[in-house]
Amino acid sequence: MSRRAINGAILGAALLAGLVCVWKLQERVDAARATLQLDDDELALRSPAVMKKLSLEYAPLMGAIYWTRAVQYFGSKHQSHDQNLHQLWPLLDIATTLDPNLVVAYRFGAMFLSDAPPRGAGEPDHAVELLQRGLKANPEYWRFYQDLGDVYYFDKKDYLKASQAFEAGSRIPGTHPFMKIMAAKIAGEGESLETSFTLWLDIFQTSTNKDIRKNAEGHLRLVKMEMDLRAINQIADVYEQKTKQRATRIADLAEAGLLTGRPVDPDGFPYVLEEQGKAEPNPKSPLREEWLKEKKQRSNGATK
Amino acid sequence: MPQGAIEIENLSKEYPYGFLHLKKKKSLEDLTMRVEDGEVFGFLGPNGAGKSTTIKLLMRLIFPTAGTARILGKSIDDVSMHGSIGYLPEQPYFYDYLTAYEVLDYFARFHGLRANDRRARVEAMLKKVGLDTAKKIQLRKYSKGMLQRVGLAQAILHDPQVVVLDEPMSGLDPLGRREVRDIILELKREGRTVLFSTHVLSDAEMLCDRVGVIVGGKLRGIGAPGELVDMKAQGMEILFELSRAPGNLPLLAKAMRTGERYRVQFPETELYAALDALKAAGARILSVTQIKPTLEEYFMDLVEADRAQASAVEVSGK
Amino acid sequence: MRNIQAVAANTFREAVRDRVLYNLVFFALLMMGAAILVGQISIGIEQDVIVSLGLTAISVVGIFIAVFLGVALVSKEMDKRTLYALLAKPVKRWEFLLGKFFGLVMTLTVNTAAMAAGLYIALWTVKHPLMKSDAYILVAVYLILLKLALIVALALLFSCFTTPFLAILFTAGMYVAGLFAGDLRTVQGVELDPAALGLMRGISYLLPNFENFNVMGAVVHGSGVPAAIVWQDTLYAILYVAIVLAGAAVVFSRRNLK
């Protein structure tokens, strides 16, 4: 082999070795940096007004960049199971200030700002603020009213304002008829499982954002489970009426002819009855934990 | 056979050009020649002929497509050999934020000269090229001639055995050209080998032991200026002054006139007859010279031939 | 070794005599002054604002110098033909490149140190006794310097084989890509087949991860930077710079000068 070929081969091998070292080193650096408290470094400049000035005529582009960073922020927090999403609002605040027509940012923010941890940031007031800005800049976008209604209904539990939001949205041309229906239903009943299910279902079916759909699906499963549990409890009450006894197993209800087959939750685990005869998710079901959390939050809210 | 100072063998350079670099332009084709130790060798040729290409190949600024070359016995790939070569680039330009002293000092470092040596050498060079007084002025304020002199200084400050100069006279006024010529002659006296390129034929005729004529990327002729051209005299030329033209001087018809001066040519045999006629007419003889073919004519013939060949190639579509 | 030193010293000298640098440094110091002003407005976090604006200024100015001067290092010498006389000396092409690299890095070090001094002065005027935790700012500055060295190496590499304009574009592009390299690794919610995902991961590791050198978040709030990060970043920078410069040397050695 000629001298040059040998040199070339050595250089090539050295380059390859170097790149492998770079890779390995990078993994170490990533690990070291994860322990570093770098939580607040998403934004060097917090003021949306200043950012807007700095962006000159490129504000929409900067808005898009901040929106992208918001999504990345959300994604990486979720991947590391970090519940602390308090940078989400500032990021979305700046993104929508720079580009008030960034519809997707408003919708994303509405859901993930208001949803309680670990799904979201648990800041429904910020979600409301965001949506109101969105409506100001895009008054014809009735979906914002839907999102607003969802925030009031699910997270702020303010059924009056929720109903009003759906009502306002139902008056915009091109709106979906279900807005009016929801307005009426919420005004009449306040919170109900059917309403919740309908609201989440619409989002799941119409959203094009993968994160939003995934979140809606999660909520849907819980609501479906609640509906199932309620139905089973109603059947258990009928059983009690009939037999003057509390059923202790689902099988009892089936044997009494009140239930066909074994009802399962959305994950496929059969429901069980606990000691006092109330229906519950199966202990092996991954949904059980979420259901317990919801129940706890509900009782917390009730005692407030 | 003792080795030449510069030996070139089948040196070629092609440049790809055109769409997708598919076509190739041959800027130097198969050059084989030697420059002997201690001689002054001139590269002659029109612009774009390949003179600069050859020199850049020798100095390893560009790389040959084929062929080899050796300077002082070492291959041109050997960069350490540059310690014995001095090079003046075409239209030199140096760091204009430095003074002449600083530039020379900078270049001197690459030759491994110690600080004291450096200082002495640089001062000597500045004096030699006449930039002593301007040495503290930044190069951005220098004239072209001064820059050329700085270039020469950096080329010779490390006492090189071989000196390569690319168009050293270009852009200089007559005084500058004279100075460069003198320096080249001094280098020759010191026993160094000098290779320089030029398209000014009179310089080559005056300075070179041998010349190589490059036209269209090929070496067309090589030898002493006198050898290349048939030195047989082709006649005589008389330059004379005549204030009043007499009516009966037939040779006046053949003469070229500028004011009161006339220039006329004869075959050698008719010289004395013409001189007598002029004496009779009261003309004042200014000079009598031989008409010799010059390097220029030889050169122009070559260029014409090359052009004819090139257009023939185009026409034939190859 | 001596050749590299000579080229480096000359490069440094050129940078010093080039007035553009003074303007940039002046601009950075201006930013320090502005930071003090802004700090007055945001009560309670003047220090945070000064440090973050100051570090940003140092970083931005440094990047500009690294990109533009980094590209000019080689392309200017080729354009103006100053390189011709130099390469005719007994100096190897890679020695020239290395000298240029070190010369510019030296320049950047001096500039950055000057600006860091300005930052400390600004900080001192706002909160008179400087605490030990303020020393961490120096760590942030050091890491910025590592980042700048890497950018210079990249600029050198690109300027060896493209026009100055493209070299600037590529270098800046590489910088931006490198900033987002880390995000590429944690990308969420994208459906791609495993091969494409693997490719993306590979690219994310091999791009210069400039985020490694960013500790502004920690330093601004006075928390420290673990020594491990400093050592690892130093090693990373040295390794990456070596690879890039080796590439530049290979490209440059066979380049025909016009």
Image (cartoon, rainbow, N blue to C red):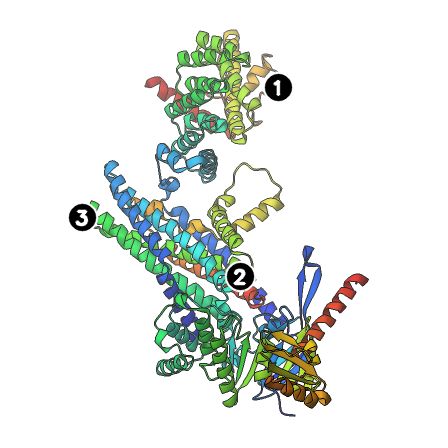
Task: Single out the mark in the foreground, 3 or 1.
Answer: 3
User: Mark 1 falls on what kind of element?
Assistant: loop
- Does B118 appear above or below C40? below
Between residues B51 and A117, which one lies in front from this camera angle? B51
Q: Is residue C194 visible?
A: yes
Q: What's the amino acid at mark 2?
A: Cys
The residue that appears at 56% across and 22% down in the rendered structure is A206
Tell how many labels: 3
In the rendered image, the residue lying farthest to the front is B247
Q: CA distance from mark 3 to mark 1?
A: 77 Å
Q: What's the amino acid at mark 3?
A: His
Q: Label 1 is found on which chain of the structure?
A: A
The residue that appears at 45% across and 34% down in the rendered structure is A63
Image location (x, y in percent) of residue B118: 38, 80
Q: Label 2 is found on which chain of the structure?
A: C
The numbered dot on residue A261 is 1
Image location (x, y in percent) of residue C150: 45, 57
Q: Is residue B135 visible?
A: no
Q: Which residue is mark 2?
A: C160
Image location (x, y in percent) of residue C69: 43, 57
Image location (x, y in percent) of residue C130: 21, 50
Q: What's the amino acid at mark 1?
A: Gly
Between residues C174 and C239, which one lies in front from this camera angle? C174
Q: Which residue is mark 3?
A: C128
Q: Is residue B300 toward the left or the right of residue B75 in the image?
A: right
User: Mark 3 falls on what kind of element?
Assistant: loop
Q: CA distance from mark 2 to mark 3?
A: 48 Å
